[in-house]
Image: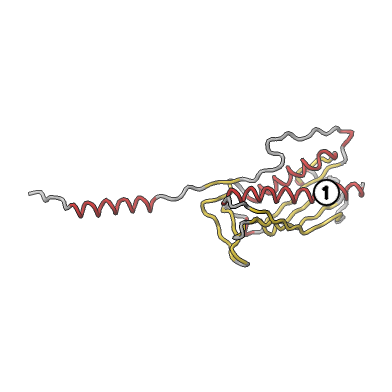
Amino acid sequence: MMRRSCPLYTALCAVLLLGLSACGSSPAVHFYTLTSLQEGKSSPAIEMAERQGIIAVGPVEIADYLNRPQIVRRDGASSVTLLEVDRWAGSLQGDVARVLLDNLAVLLGPSGYVVLPWETSPLADGRIQVSVTRFEGTDQDTVVLDALWTLNGKEKGDILAAGNTVIVEPAGGGGAGGMVEAMNRALAELSRRIAAEAETKLGQAG
């Protein structure tokens, strides 16, 4: 003779199945990429007669703790949080190098400088190297960019300019998206400062 199912038992099974289903699902991951001043714009044309020289950019390095898929947020002097559901679509180091190259091309192009990756331009008139020691959101709803950079001349060991630039940008309370937009602005400001030095120093060296 078949037993009748107990309503309480059936209800408990349903709750258990729902719980297991909830445990099996995970939050959606959001992917981000940095954008340059050149995004959506065409590069200005440069006549050969107006060319001032070639500037190589690279290598561009970032601190090891930043070189990971997750976006990093600093919570204290020695504490950081990895945002597991907010990640870079590619390599952060590659993104930073690409954006700096594009930004410097936009900023220095009108003055007649051709900006190229350092690997492809060994005989450049100047070379910009960048080392990023901090590039993260903070618990103060800001983004901090701390970068060491040098501008080398054509001759080996010839340093025309160098700096340690720290830039703080408000993130505007927009979560990871706001942080990434602030990071774009910080990279744009760093690019402007380096471009101004490069234009002045290379002009003097020439």
* Mark 1 residue element: helix
The image shows residue 10 at horizontal and vertical percentages of: 21, 51
The image shows residue 78 at horizontal and vertical percentages of: 61, 67
| x 66%, y 50%: residue | 183
Is 27 placed above or below 50 here? below
| x 83%, y 42%: residue | 54
Side (left or right) of 122 relative to 73: right
In which image quadrant can residue 169 be found? bottom right
Near mark 1 (Cα within 10 A), the count class, few <14, some 14-19 or many ≥20, is: few
Side (left or right) of 31 relative to 51: left
| x 60%, y 49%: residue | 178
The image shows residue 185 at horizontal and vertical percentages of: 69, 48
| Badge 1 amino acid | Ala
| Of 31 and 64, the residue lying toward us | 31
The residue identified by callout 1 is 196
| x 63%, y 67%: residue | 77
The image shows residue 27 at horizontal and vertical percentages of: 46, 50
